[in-house]
Amino acid sequence: MTKEFEEIGPTNEPSEVAFQLLADWWMDSIQALVDAVGSSKALELLRPHYKNAGISASLVIKNSFGLSGPDNRESWAIIQKMGYDFLTRADPSVFNLDSRDIGGTARSTDCPFKNGPLELCKLVCDTFPNTTLAGYTPDYEIVTTARISQGDPECVWITKPRSWELPVDIERLGNIKCETIRRRFPKEIVDDFSIQYLAEMWVISIRAYLEQFGNEKPASILRTYMKLSGTSFGLRHLRANPNAFKNNIAGGCVGLCYDALHTKMAQAEITKSNFERTIVECPFQDAPQEVCMQIASFCEGICESIDPDYQFAYDRMMTKGDGSCHWTIKKKEEQKAPDDRHPTDHLDRLIRKFIDGEITEDEFKNKMAVLKEMEIIKK
């Protein structure tokens, strides 16, 4: 796992819940791809998607805010600053960018993705800005010279002519011509952009995984990360509602996530043994079916952590062509004897030990790596 839900609870503001969920899912989807194919191959698979996403995001910001000035480095700097602030939901003072006589510099003192995989850092801090910069001034490039994710006190970027070799003395870039304004946007605008950005980043990372392995092969590594994420979320939710009926806790916890992700659901149907919801609109309804399966794994983790006797299941999904999605949390059917279990049920045993506090998160990941090495869990 790459990010903890330390602050999430049932009373949290929905957009913050959505941000933390999607940020965690995004980081884990990239880490799962790296685990499956290695860093170089993962970046090779992801970069084309992220280049397109960077260009699209830049155009959306330019058109949404009427930025109709000349296509130069100063215009690019304004859009870059806005895009970074939206993506990270950071205070405007965190990321500062200037334009100089020859090039420019940028610095960030914090990042919500600093504990994520290095590959995410390279995509956001290298691929994104260089792709968009090429449309404004193709003779220049962005170079990252320091990364918080690698232990540096801040992230530092230099915009320089492509012909210049590294290292570059910042004094060679000349005097500061302008600095980007630390503009605060209304919360609803930041929420809208940040959630859309993160959702898109998560979905395209899953698409890259599917391009490598195809739709037929179960995305076992992806789903394992998601289930663990749901387990962590469910445990925190349970601690906040220790006396409620567990089926209602699980249903409310799952419903909280769907509400935060801007789905539209019909009224819950609750009985003593079942908790059911129908989703009539979903921002992911045109996404690959695997996206639904990822969310299902997350919800399975929630149920597993709150009460292992209950399970989450879809019986309708819009990504499969159904008119709506319908999910149920209900009592599990009688299980087969342990001797009849599939070898991958070792994952369930490990997850149970993690939930019960018998092993730490690091121990879990180490044991999972051994199972993959022994090919008990497919890589």
Image (cartoon, rainbow, N blue to C red):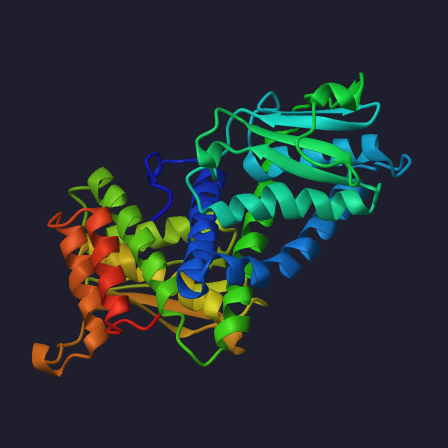
358 lies left or right of 185 = left
Quick check: can you spot residue 94?
A: yes
Residue 282: x and y in percent read 53, 60
Q: Quadrant of the C terminus?
A: bottom left
Residue 20: x and y in percent read 44, 42
As drawn, the residue found furthest toward the right would be 70
Q: Is residue 265 above or below residue 156?
A: below
Residue 1: x and y in percent read 34, 49
All told, the count of numbered labels is 0
Name which residue lies at 23% across and 67% down. Answer: 371
292 lies left or right of 341 = right
Quick check: can you spot residue 266?
A: no
Name which residue lies at 55% across and 33% down. Answer: 89
* Viewer-nearest residue: 283 or 227: 227
Residue 362: x and y in percent read 24, 47
328 lies left or right of 172 = left
Q: Residue 278: name its quadrant.
A: bottom left
Name which residue lies at 78% across and 41% down. Answer: 162
Name which residue lies at 15% across and 79% down. Answer: 341
272 lies left or right of 297 = left
